[in-house]
Amino acid sequence: MTEHVDDALWDEFHRVVNMSARQLDEWLATDVADEHSEPDPHQQAAPDGRRVLGILRKRRGDLTRDDAETMQAVVDHVHEARRDDLEPVAGQAAWRRHLMRIGHDPLEPPRDPRT
């Protein structure tokens, strides 16, 4: 299944998803992470956080075409909401929660996918 996820997508997904699987799992278990809490009408629908969590828990060789599509959607969504350098930046609380639902905390630096 590795052919579904090329090196560029793998690296960029793991760069923009700067929360660990454990952090994301704990965040998704909180009430404030609920997608219906304080919805922001200016935000487009984000990929599902549970799907992102599932991807983080898989080995690259176990990823499916659907996983690759979710990974690309996460990368696109984060880049649309953020600038390309992904340096830590504060913003409105609802905006931060929205991004954290897919594993990106804008207050944290991007992860190095090679570590």
Image (tube, rainbow, N blue to C red):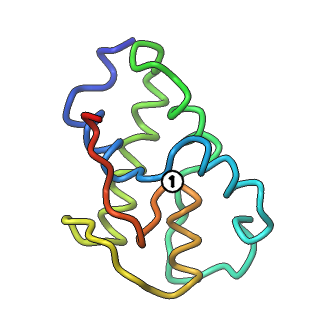
Q: Is 114 displayed left or right of 102 in the figure?
A: left
Q: Which residue is mark 1?
A: 103
Q: Quadrant of the N terminus?
A: top left
Residue drawn at x 59%, y 59% as measured from the top left: 101
Residue 107 spot, x, y in % from top left:
42, 72
Residue drawn at x 24%, y 71% as measured from the top left: 83
Q: Is 78 displayed left or right of 35 in the figure?
A: left
The picture quadrant where one finds residue 34 is: bottom right
Label 1 element class: loop
Residue drawn at x 47%, y 14% as measured from the top left: 62
- Above or below, 5 relative to 46: above
Disc 1 residue type? Gly
Q: Is 54 displayed left or right of 72 in the figure?
A: right
Given residues 99 and 67, the one toward you in this image is 99
Extreme-bottom residue of the structure: 92
Residue drawn at x 41%, y 84% as measured from the top left: 90
Residue 112 spot, x, y in % from top left:
27, 45
* Crowding near the residue tagged with mark 1, few <14, some 14–19, many ≥20 C-alpha atoms within 10 Å: many
Given residues 4 and 49, the one toward you in this image is 49
The picture quadrant where one finds residue 51 is: top right
